[in-house]
Structures are given as structure tokens and as C-alpha cells.
Image (spheres, rainbow, N blue to C red):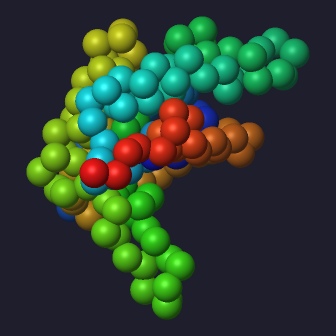
Amino acid sequence: MRFVVQVCSEASVEVEGKEVGAIGSGALVLVGIGREDTREIADRMVKKLLGLRIYPDEEGKTNLSLQAVGGSLLIVSQFTLYADCRKGNRPSFFKAGEPEEAERLYLYVAEKCRAAGFPVERGVFGAEMKIRLVNEGPFTVVLDSDELFGKKEEG
């Protein structure tokens, strides 16, 4: 599972000309689901996301969590985070999760964040979306479950 976390002062997502989600201060989180991802991995990723101290304190140091700043989340699915560009010029998406399971896990991630008490907006899984973002800093971090928790077993 991969999260691209972008600190923002505002972000929104539009589908077919209609805004479907918008937040003020908080984070836009692009979520990529891999073939081997599970709810257990999602739980660990959400815990890491919600605990990140990536917001500035009074002295400008990145020392505060989303909860400390009262921030919101805009969570958007993005299978292209699993693009493999090693061969040729056209990316392969073989490592991206199958759509049905990926959607279940994407919705699960959003619900886990909401259940933890955070305001959550989201995009529409599988839709063509337009995302607007005012990235503060800019401050962007990438969370990859393989890097954080070790490579999943092949099998």
C-alpha cells in the first residue's frame, strides 16, 4: 500500500464537473492499493498516517500531528502509484490491486480514518477526477508499506 500525503491549506476533488469532496486545512492523501494488500496492512498504514508529525508548531518546526492541528483528510484512490516504469516508456500496472478488492480497501482506509475521529472527504473510486490542491510548504511525504513494514511474502 502506498500513500502520498500532501499537507494542504485546501484541497478538493471533482468528478464530471461536480465537486464530490473538499477540505480546508489538513492533508490530501493519494492511496495506491497493491495486489497483496490486506486490512492488516491498511490498519498499520492508517495508524502511521494519523500519527505523522508533519505540521508546523509555533516555532515553525514540523512537530504536530493532524489531530493537534484539527485537520481534515481528502482521501483519493490512485492506482497509478503502482506504475512500473522499468521497461520501455509505457508504465505497467501489474502490481496494482484488482479493482474490486482495491476499492474495498480504499473505502476501508477512509472509514478507519473517520472512525478515529477525523473529518474525511474522498474521491470516487475508478472515476476520472480533477484534484485541486494548495500544498503548504510544499510538504509531501510518501508512505510505502513495503518500506515501512517489510516486503510482503510472495506466495
Q: How many marks?
A: 0
Q: Quadrant of the N terminus?
A: top left
Seen at 56% across and 35% down, the residue is 148
Indicate the position of residue 33 as horizontal and vertical percent values.
33, 48
In the orientation shown, which residue stands out farthest toward the bottom? 88
Q: Give the answer, above or below, for where 1 lies relative to 85.
A: above
Indicate the position of residue 58 as horizontal and vertical percent values.
81, 12
Q: Is residue 3 left or right of residue 117?
A: right
Q: Is residue 57 left or right of residue 129?
A: right
Residue 52 falls in image quadrant: top right
Seen at 48% across and 45% down, the residue is 151
In the orientation shown, which residue stands out farthest toward the left? 100
Q: Give the answer, above or below, for where 25 lies relative to 69.
A: below
Q: Is residue 19 left or right of residue 134?
A: left
Whether residue 122 appears in this view of the structure is yes
Residue 16 falls in image quadrant: bottom left
Whether residue 19 appears in this view of the structure is no
Seen at 43% across and 86% down, the residue is 90
Indicate the position of residue 146 as horizontal and vertical percent values.
50, 44
Along the viewing direction, whichever of 153 and 136 lies nearer the viewer = 153
Residue 83 falls in image quadrant: bottom left
Along the viewing direction, whichever of 99 and 38 lies nearer the viewer = 38
Seen at 40% across and 44% down, the residue is 152
Q: Is residue 74 left or right of residue 6?
A: left
Indicate the position of residue 46 as horizontal and vertical percent values.
42, 25
In the orientation shown, which residue stands out farthest toward the front? 155
